[in-house]
Image (tube, grey):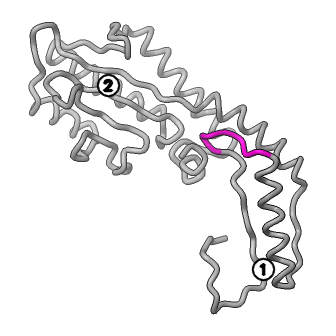
Amino acid sequence: GTREHLASDQHYLSVQAGFQLLSRQGLASEPELLDFRTTIETLAKRTQMHCESPDMRAALDAARALDGVCADCDFQVALHVIPAADSTLPVNEVEALLLESGLTSSGVGYVLDADTEGLGVAVTAIDGRLERGGSFVMDVPKTPAAYRTWLRLEHTAAQIAARFAARVVDDEMADLNEAALRAISRQVEQAEQRLVGIDIPPGSALALRLFG
């Protein structure tokens, strides 16, 4: 159902209270869950309502199992396009390629059209200057169609590198060859498949709440 704040001038036949057991910060503790349940039971007693709650131990065990899957899928992938030594990239032409690939300028970088806050994908200029290169970063669980999106970013980076004799490198500034890029893509694909398999597709409202 829908969620809303309780209003003092409204009457309710039933109320459902929820407690998020798992987030990017980790698993909630048993004392935290106990405190929440006690608060709800106290409120129910004061308002003369009947209160039912699930088994706390079973809920924590289920959250712990989910944490194991989510931890394996919680990562970012990145690559960087940098100019050859003693040269720079043509800013206007690089920006045109980024926009053609489906990215939108956010003022501080480039993001996916449907992700104006840059939650999943962000392309930013190195040292704040696009002529020095660009960093392509994707937060896997926050990005819709993560695998397809990453392939699109890879393709855009390769286009820029080929057109302007630039390099595609990793965080250590080591060149990324085809084998390395395939390994990254496979890792993204596997993470997306696992999240879809537990009904938390990357970029979905549930994924954004869980990995927010």
Residue occupied by mark 2: 155
Q: Is residue 24 magenta?
A: yes
Label 2: few (<14), some (14–19) or many (≥20) C-alpha neighbours in 10 Å? few
Left/right of residue 76 with respect to residue 106 in the rendered view: right
Left/right of residue 108 with respect to residue 170 in the rendered view: left
**Which segment did they paint magenta?**
23-29
Q: Residue at x 20, y 31 (%)?
A: 128
Residue 27 rendering spot, x and y as whole percentages? 71, 41
Left/right of residue 142 with respect to residue 90 in the rendered view: right
Residue occupied by mark 1: 14
Name the one closer to the observer, 15 or 81: 15
Q: Amino acid at mark 1?
A: Ser
Q: Residue at x 83, y 49 (%)?
A: 59
Residue 114 rendering spot, x and y as whole percentages? 37, 51
Q: Residue at x 58, y 46 (%)?
A: 207
Q: Which residue lies most toward the bottom here?
A: 9
Q: Residue at x 36, y 21 (%)?
A: 79
Residue 185 rendering spot, x and y as whole percentages? 48, 22
Label 1: few (<14), some (14–19) or many (≥20) C-alpha neighbours in 10 Å? few
Which callout, 2 or 1, points at the residue further toward the start of the chain?
Answer: 1
Name the one closer to the observer, 18 or 30: 30
Residue 162 rendering spot, x and y as whole percentages? 20, 15
Q: Amino acid at mark 2?
A: His
Left/right of residue 33 with respect to residue 180 in the rendered view: right
